[in-house]
Amino acid sequence: MNGTNVAYDLSIYEEQQTKSEEKEEQRQPAKLIKVKTGLNRSFKRMCNILSIAVSLSLVIAVLSTNASITSCTSNIAKKQGEIVELESENAYLNFSLESRMSLNNVEEKAVGALGMVKMDSAQVEYIEIEDENKIEVTNPELKDKLEDAMKPILSYLLP
């Protein structure tokens, strides 16, 4: 040997690999190889384009969903703000109603606008009621009943 290490000499394998590739090319016609590789390439391109389209459609769907959620959330926040504002206004109106309907305000309106005065003890009158209450029912006679029934008829006939 000439002092080189044969273990690192890979040129031996290159010759064997090129020979096996040549044999394979001879077995199959050249046109079929080109057609298969062309189909594989176009199929891979279509798969890539399809996967990109699906990915983009998913991203668009997620973005539109997030946009609608954000829109609904902002609408809810606005409505809650309106509710708080209306509850505050309701409390104010109830308070003003109670203050207007207080006894002092009613008394001032009665004295000032209507000219009313407070009642004195001299204006109080006491009524005496008997101890027992009695109801008397009279039994009208038949003659009285007939007279009462005939009065409308007679008044109609006799002018």
Image (cartoon, rainbow, N blue to C red):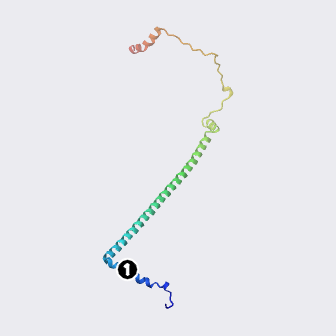
**In the image as oriented, which residue stretches furthest toward the bottom?**
2
Residue type beneath disc 1: Glu
From this viewpoint, which residue is outermost toward the front? 1
Tell which of 3 and 69 is nearer to you: 3
Q: Position of residue 1 (x, y in %)?
A: 49, 90
The image shows residue 123, relative to residue 103, as above or below, that is above
How far across and how far down the image is residue 57, in percent?
42, 63
**What crowding class fits label 1: few (fewer than 14 Cα within 10 Å), some (14-19), or many (20 or more)?**
few
Query: Quick one: 127 or 4, which is closer to the camera?
Result: 4
Quarter of the image with the C terminus in it: top left
Please, what secondary structure does the residue beneath circle 1 have?
helix
The residue depicted at 42 percent of the width and 15 percent of the height is: 152
Q: Tell me: 116 left or right of 143.
A: right
Percent x, y of residue 31: 31, 76
In which quarter of the view is residue 121 placed?
Answer: top right
Instruction: Count how many numbered circles sit on residues in the image.
Output: 1
Residue 24 or residue 141, whichever sits in front: 24
* Residue visible at 59% across and 43% down in the picture: 94
Q: Is residue 114 above or below residue 143?
A: below
Q: Residue at x 35, y 79 (%)?
A: 23
- x and y, in percent, of residue 48 in the image: 40, 69
Instruction: Please give the name of the residue rendered at 39% of the width and 70% of the height, measured from the top-left corner.
Output: 44
Viewer-proximal residue among 122 and 12:
12
Residue pointed to by mark 1: 21
